[in-house]
Amino acid sequence: MSDIQLLIVDDEEDGAILSARQIERSGHEVNWLRVDTEAAMRKALSEQTWDIVLSDHIMPHFDAFAALKLLKSLELITPLVVVSGRIGEETAVELMRAGAAHYVSKDNVSRLSVVMNHVLADRQEHQQQVQQDKTRLAASRMEVAHTLAGGLSHEFNNLMVGVVTTSEILLQRDNEPPENQRLLQMIYDSGIRAVQVSRQLLAYAQGAKFNVSTIHVESLIHQALERIQHLSQDNTHITLELLQDSGHVEGDKAQLSQLLEGILHNAIEAMPHGGDICVSTFQHTQQHQQNHLDAGQYIGIGIRDTGVGMESDQLAHVFEPFYTTKFLGRGLGLAAAWGIAQSHDGHIEVSSVMGEGSCFSVLLPVKMEQEHHHETLNTETPHTYTDKKTILLVEDNEVVISVTSTLLRHWGHSIFLAKNAKQALIQAQEKSEHIDLIILDLGLPDRSGGDIIGELRGLIPQAPVLIVSGYPANDKVHELLEMENTAFLKKPFSPIEVSEKIHHLFAGL
């Protein structure tokens, strides 16, 4: 039998001893405390958690009604059983209505152990129900967050095409005065930071993956370290303890780098006066499904700092968006890291000791040797595709239409414009012989771009398709990308990205 933490509200020591011994006879180990005033009961409730409260009905300075009122005011669900001399039926009903779990007469105290077992069983069932309700509520909130984040990200990324892409086009002009160049660079840099926040929000809510590839873990770590190097102070020392071969994982390299950068950024902020950060890799075998991890082999990336550390209550909230303490970050870094790990079938574990530091362990599924090809570094100069083409642009957002059309015409391409699926199919049917490329937005007002891509292919079989969206490349998009000569471009995009995508599409013909 388990230990029972028993709080007895009674002005008589003998009565309390009798109740405790009666419960002990049922096989329980009882740790009990007697109080007989509201102040003493309040103090006892604040100092520890009690499994059950036994209360006499009437005492010189307290009573069962006041005890129930105190429990309610403190928002505690600890069951209270009234153990008293004979009381009238009307009083017993009033006590039950006030929240008492049961009533046992002192003349029949032998029933106490049976009543207590029933009460504790009911309490456990209630706690399970409360936890299930919390889980359902959290899932419902997350579903709303998924929808909201996806919609906001799509609209936001459409708007940022007008900021990021336009400013980059202007920055490429040679005749801009230096002051204009400086201001344009500020606009571009601010736009890029805004896009990064949008993607962090999407990573937290949806675990968005844009470009999936096989990634060498060691190169991923070095990339993340390079990107946060400017944040560290001179007295911040970073050491590496990496396996001889850290192996490969499959995922979105930019997202996984963002994951590590978020944790490293948090480590640096936790050491305002400098300190040590150790980044390590290790192998992990998951024997059974647990913590969202399937059984299998994982590569672990450990990030340990000597910062201020966190209390247990802080640890419980550390992955919540915009959660802040005096020493923790104030944004989406760790929240996004959690979402990214989950979307890559991984997990993040964290431990911390106040005054000693924190340790984050990222677990990601190993990509087996026969499944991957080693990454090659692309050292080619970005290609600007200059062959003149006729392009069917299927897009409903006026900002994106204006920027994309300007960019394509600047390169000498001809444009047929369709603002919805119906117009796109009409254009494709009437001008199929002239169209060399289709640039297709997925979020059209009448039908999804994904729904009409097959029909467009049937009408213009010779034309490759560049899918463009402010949403991440989800499973549906990955299915579309299995089609021949199809590529994906996320918004907002740079001129070089557009040019390279077009170049690669025609190179595949």
Image (cartoon, helix red, strand yellow):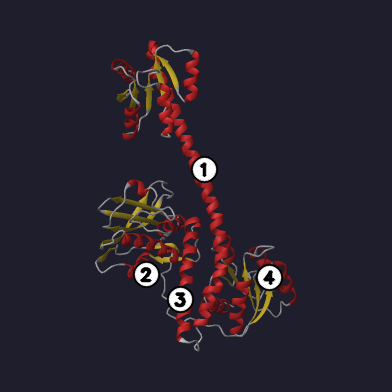
Asked which quadrant contains residue 271, the reply is bottom left
Instruction: Check whether the beta carbons of the residues at disc 2 and disc 4 lie within 8 A of each other.
Output: no
Residue 81 in the image: above or below residue 133: above
Residue 1 visible in the current orientation: no
| Distance between the alpha carbons at the discs numbered 3 and 4 | 32 Å
Asked which quadrant contains residue 32, the reply is top left
| Distance between the alpha carbons at the discs numbered 3 and 2 | 19 Å
| Distance between the alpha carbons at the discs numbered 1 and 2 | 38 Å
Of badges 3 and 2, the one in the foreground is: 3
| Distance between the alpha carbons at the discs numbered 3 and 1 | 44 Å
Residue wearing tag 2: 227
Q: Secondary structure at mark 4?
A: loop
Pointer 3 local density, CA inside 10 Å: few below 14, some 14–19, many at least 20: few
Residue 446 in the image: above or below residue 175: above
| Marking on residue 186 | 3
Quadrant containing the C terminus is bottom right
- Please tell me which residue is depicted at 30% across the width and 51% down the height of the picture: 352
Residue wearing tag 4: 419
Q: Amino acid at mark 1?
A: Arg
Quadrant containing the N terminus is top left
Q: Nearer the viewer, residue 69 or 182?
A: 69
Q: Secondary structure at mark 2?
A: helix
Label located before the other in sequence (3 or 4): 3
Residue wearing tag 1: 136
Pointer 4 local density, CA inside 10 Å: few below 14, some 14–19, many at least 20: some
Of badges 3 and 4, the one in the foreground is: 3
Label located before the other in sequence (1 or 4): 1
Of badges 3 and 1, the one in the foreground is: 3
Label located before the other in sequence (3 or 2): 3
| Marking on residue 278 | none
Q: Amino acid at mark 3?
A: Met
Q: Secondary structure at mark 1?
A: helix
